[in-house]
Amino acid sequence: MKNIYINILVILLIIILHQQIFSFGDTSSNSVYGEYTFVRQDYFGQNDEYETPFFVFKGSEPGPVMILDGGIHGDEIASYMACDTIVKYINLKKGTLIVIPRTNIIACKQNTREINFDFNHAFPGDITNDTYEYRLAYEFMWLVDSVKPDLIINLHEAHTKWTPKALTDPEKAYGQIVISCIQPFEELLVRSVDNMNQFIPAGDFTFHTHYYSFKEYSSLDNFVSKFNIKSYTVETYRGFAIEDRVKLQLIAALQFMKEIGLEFYIPDSITKFK
Ligand SMILES: [Zn+2]
């Protein structure tokens, strides 16, 4: 009699385990079987204090590779909320997309810009340094060097909104800009900003191209100068309502994905302004 109970228990356990394993594969409610592949969740700093998850999506067709990062500054919340939305809904058909929603995860958890110092000043990083920001920057550079993406988009937010005066200020970042450290602006940047603005109500929300002078310690400048990879930084204005900021970040990120040649499905409703 006892054996029967044990057998039933084992069968129940197998059923539960089976369901857990096979429900894990489907990360998108809009997926069509065979159209996309979710490769894996990976980490920076595995077993280190800053263990940081990131997500690798690979379409069924080979194509361009893009990295999208948010949360380099932990209090720029629209950046990682937009990344979370893409991770949740993206159905990638062609190319590879790597999303790092909370790059500086310790700062994100505390909703603060930085912990020991500005993480965006820690590049190209140092894996032997006692301060985690340098180790994290090194790992980010290592990832970029490993996958050699066609484009890296960095999502940020700013306290000051763009005005025409910003056009002559290469030492400051503003809200509603897309930053390049290269002049003249690359055609990909100009075209992408023009096209993203087609989805945005005219006026305050409009994005502007912006030249920010080269900084040897910053992420963007290291991606561009060390690896010759195109990289731009999107800044939304923190004075706007959070739901608008997330939509603006999404419109910018998705537009760059389209322009670089990724093919994907994502519901229109996540970027619709009322
Ligand atoms: Zn920032």
Image: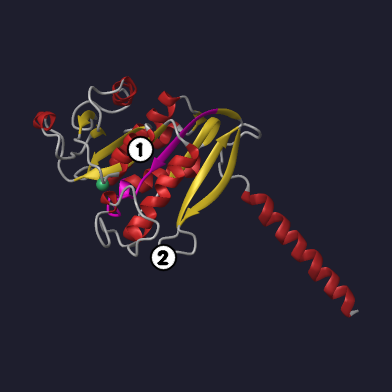
**Residue 17, placed above or below residue 38:** below
Percent x, y of residue 267? 47, 34
Percent x, y of residue 130? 34, 65
**Which tag, 2 or 1, sits closer to the chain's start?**
2
Disc assigned to residue 49: 2
Q: Considering the numbered disc 2 on the image, is that residue within a helix, a strand or a loop?
A: loop
In the image, which residues are magenta?
63-78
| Residue lying at 84% horizontally and 75% vertically, measured from the top left | 5
Q: Considering the numbered disc 1 on the image, is that residue within a helix, a strand or a loop?
A: helix
| Residue lying at 39% horizontally and 51% vertically, measured from the top left | 138
Of residues 112 and 84, the one drawn nearer to the viewer in this rendering? 112
Of residues 231 and 92, the one drawn nearer to the viewer in this rendering? 231
Disc assigned to residue 226: 1
Q: Is residue 271 visible?
A: no
Percent x, y of residue 85? 43, 43
Q: Residues within 10 Å of mark 1 (few under 14, many from 20)?
A: few
**Residue 232, placed above or below residue 138:** above
Locate residue 241: give its quadrant: top left
Q: Residues within 10 Å of mark 2 (few under 14, many from 20)?
A: few
